[in-house]
Amino acid sequence: MTKTLRKPIEGTPATEQTSTELKPQAVREMLGLELAEMAEVMGMGEFGYSAWERGTRRPGGPAFQLLKVINDAGSKVLPVLRDVQSN
């Protein structure tokens, strides 16, 4: 019997959140996207993005910066990100 090892979820483990932190679910809902669409825009898997929404992981580094840009200028940035994904 072969056992398949699962790759651990990357990102920062969830800890106490402050009210000033971005909420991934709120950003996604503001744009009117489904979870799978938002994960694709972010260049990650659906499971990883859902971990952010559940609060079991937090976005860090470049992922946090991208989420912030999407939050601040989503309607302008979204077409560019979708174009990048299609190439």
Image (cartoon, rainbow, N blue to C red):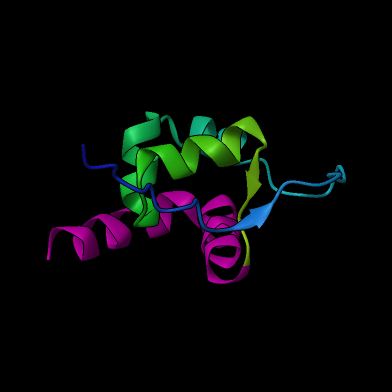
The residue range painted magenta reads 61-87
| Direction from residue 36 to residue 9 in the image, left or right | right
Residue 83 lies left or right of residue 69; in this view the side is left
In-front residue for pair 59/33: 59
Residue sticking out furthest to the bottom = 62
* Residue at x-position 65% and y-position 38%: 56
Whether residue 53 appears in magenta in the rendering, the answer is no
x, y (%) of residue 69? 55, 62
Q: Residue at x 83, y 49 (%)?
A: 20
On screen, residue 36 above or below 58: above
Residue 36 position within the rendered picture, expressed as x and y whole percent measured from the top left: 33, 35
Q: Is the magenta stretch mostly helix, strand or loop?
A: helix
Image position, residue 5 (x, y; %): 35, 48
Toward which corner of the image does residue 86 lie, by quadrant?
Answer: bottom left
> Height in image: 64 above or below 13?
below
Say above or below: 5 vs 68: above
Instruction: Give the quadrant of the N terminus.
Output: top left
Which residue is at the front of the view, 13 or 73? 13
Name which residue lies at 50% across and 51% down. Answer: 9
